[in-house]
Amino acid sequence: MTQVIIYKRITLRCWKCKETYSHYEEVDAEKKLKTSCPYCKEEAIVDFSPFRNEKKVVLRHSGMSEKVIVIEYNLPEVLSTSKF
């Protein structure tokens, strides 16, 4: 099975100072994103797993069918961070 890595520009809200900032990062529910706020310099964690939606899809091609797991992320416009 082929694994596709998804990179997105995400907007984060600092857990401490509440400022928002942008970050370009790999979106993966298997790991948490560690980041630092550019305003107050506090370290933070972003968890993508609550936004993960997994579907099983059957692809049919050339007389064959194959089950594939499709993973989507329904991310909000601004993600909240939590204390590291």
Image (tube, rainbow, N blue to C red):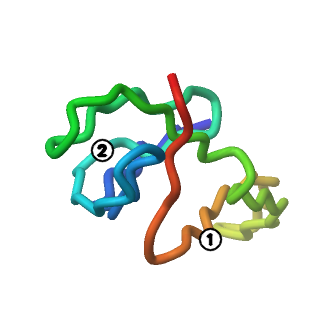
Does residue 53 sit above or below 41 in this rendering?
A: below
Which kind of residue does numbered mark 2 sit on? Glu
Does residue 50 sit above or below 43 in this rendering?
A: below
Disc 2: CA contacts within 10 A as few (<14), some (14-19) or many (>=20): few
Q: Secondary structure at mark 2?
A: strand
Residue at (63% x, 39% y) in the render = 29
Closest to the observer, 47 or 18: 18
Residue at (30% x, 44% y) in the render = 25
Which kind of residue does numbered mark 1 sit on? Asn
Query: Residue 71 appears at what percent x and percent y?
Result: 66, 56
Question: With 47 as the anchor, is 57 left or right in this view?
Answer: right
Residue at (55% x, 39% y) in the render = 82
Image mark for residue 25: 2
State how far apart marks 1 and 2 are (Cα). Answer: 15 Å
Does residue 6 sit above or below 79 in this rendering?
A: above
Closest to the observer, 33 or 52: 33
Quarter of the image holding residue 37? top left
Image mark for residue 74: 1
Question: With 33 as the anchor, is 65 left or right in this view?
Answer: right
Quarter of the image holding residue 12? bottom left
